[in-house]
Every structure is written in structure tokens, then in C-alpha cells.
Amino acid sequence: MKIAYLGNFGPIHSTETHVGISLEDLGHTVIRLQEDRYDWTMIRTMALKTDLFLWTRTWRRDDAGALETLKALADAKIPTVSAHLDLYFAVHRENQIDSEPFWKTKYVFTADGGHQAEFAQKGIRHFWMQPAVFGRECVREAPVDRYKCEVLFVGSYNYHKEHYRKELIDWLRATYGGRFSHWGHSPATTIRNLELNRLYASAAVVVGDSCNPGFQLTHYWSDRIPETLGRGGFLLHPEVVGLDQYYTPGVHFARYTFGDFAGLRQTIDRYLACPEEREKIRAAGHAHVRQHHTYAHRMAEVLETVAREERR
């Protein structure tokens, strides 16, 4: 299949870069359309020569041009697909669902599996696409001395206003002091690709989170779960309804209850004191992600879903 893919392919770690390569690994031809370099006339011309149009949006584009392109592709019977890992319902950007052409493609895939009724009410043909990790980098690396720590958090400190990350990081730092390490809070401390695997391998326990306000939303978690497990980290993540259908607590990762810092400390300390159990879970979590949760798996599911829907 020839796929026109509109997105941001500049960073080697971007979702689009990983998805594009994964599609090629599945045997498809990918025409990369760098979002900030092609206008909608060029995008439309190139996409009309392919079998499917895939869009992962980074920047806002000309609305009229986008809608004209989607109509032209629909008239040509070329399926149009939007794909995104972010949460839009229940956060500050929810209004974009009503206003952005990105949501007007024939098929929309996001990591939000808990708002199917709301998507349907807006006339969006939405499908749940769980987050994944880049298959070529779903490997275990050796620990590195400069990264070694007992408790690790990876990610920015200033996060979505709906989130509790600052409170979590402050608590981890106050509780574990020099035993705690925080990477990714500035450009100088941001680690990507296989170097991130080495960081995770060097930490005894990785504490994670997702942008899930109050962890009340069901069937939504960020790519932190497959990214951490797939890159060799031992992960503690808050409970999310639906998560245990795909990742088994105590087998693939360890879970804690949002807001229960006393319980989180007990869980961290338990696994710090049980390295054999911890390493068994680390290995099982990595193997599980490699077998079920890479971008090759996700893209195969997306294409199968589109093909099925097109036959109806």
C-alpha cells in the first residue's frame, strides 16, 4: 500500500518518524509530507496518488485548505485517517475537537478509549489506538554508571495544568533525596532513543504517570507505559480502569493508587528491597511489550480496521 503521511518527521524520536518506519517495516510505501513545508495544494496533489492519507498533527494548518483536501480525497475514494496519542477530552484543548479539521477525517484513532460515546455524539468515527513503542528500539541495554539511581522519574516538571506531576516529583525528591533522579526536566537533561533505554536499565524503580486528571478517566494512558517497559524499565504506574486488561500488575509492571503517597512509598520500598522479583517483572514487561505493543502492531491494527470498515 502507498500511504501519504502528513506530520512532523524532523525529530528522530517523533511519533511520526517511528510510525513511518514501522509502516515500511510492514511492507508499505510511505510518502512523508513534512507538515510545515507542504501547503495543502501540494499535500492534496501528492495524496491523491496514494491509497491512504494518514495525518498526525503537530501544528495548526489552514482550515479551508485542509477541508478541501479531505473532500477531494473522499471524492476519490481514498480513506483519510487521523492518529494521535494525546488526550483531548477532559483537558484544556477539548474545544479543538469541534474546530479543527484534523477531526474531520473519515477515521480517527487516538489513545483515548474512554470517550467513545462523546466522539460518536460529535459525529466522529473514532477507534481506540493504544500507545506503543518503536519496535526497532524495543530492546534492553546495559546499565550505565552515570545514570544509576534507586528511584527515577523521566519527564518535564511543568506539565498540563490538570495534572499533579509537580506534586509527585516534589514528593519523590523530598522522600528519597539523593536516591532520586529526575531526567527530562530541561533540554540538557532530555534523553531519547537508545540512550533512554540505558537510563531505564540503570534505575531500580521508575515512577510513571499519565495525563489523566485525577485518574478518573477509563481506558486512557500515555505512551509512558509501553515506552518504559519496552525500553527495559521497571515501572510503577497509577491504577487506570482498563489497563489491567492489557498489562498485568505484578507481572508486567507495578501499580499504585493516585494520590496515595504513603502507599506509593510502601510499593517503592518493597521493590527496592526485592531485586529478584523486580528484575523478573522488568524482563516480563519488556517481553510483553515487544510481543504486543510496538508501532508495527498498532499500525497493522489501524490498517486492518480501515480495511474492514471500507468493506462495509
Image (spheres, rainbow, N blue to C red):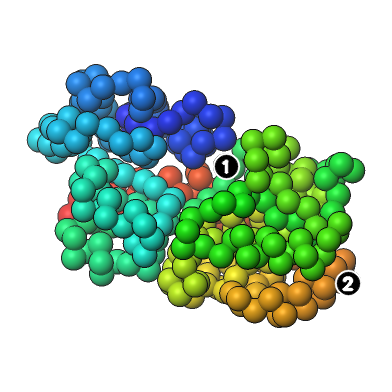
Q: Which mark is residue 134?
A: 1
As drawn, is 16 to the left or to the right of 178? left
Q: Quick one: 257 or 163, which is closer to the camera? A: 163
Quadrant where the image shows the C terminus: bottom left
Name the secondary structure under disc 2.
loop
- Residue 158 coordinates in the image, percent (x, y): 57, 51
Please name the residue shown 60% across and 76% down the image. 259
Q: Position of residue 170 (x, y in %)?
A: 69, 62
Q: Residue at x 26, y 22 (%)?
A: 39
Q: Which residue is mark 2?
A: 273
Query: Which quadrant holds residue 218?
Result: bottom left
Residue at 89% over, 43% down: 145
Amino acid type, residue under disc 2 in the picture: Ala
Where the N terminus falls, by quadrant? top left
Q: Is residue 98 above or below residue 170?
A: above
Identify which residue is drawn at 76% across, 45% down: 199
**Dot 1 amino acid type:** Phe
Looking at the rendered structure, the secondary structure element under dot 1 is: loop
Q: Residues within 10 Å of mark 1 (few under 14, many from 20)?
A: many
Give left or right: position of 311 versus 160: left
- Which residue is more in the foreground, 276 or 88? 88
Q: How many marks?
A: 2
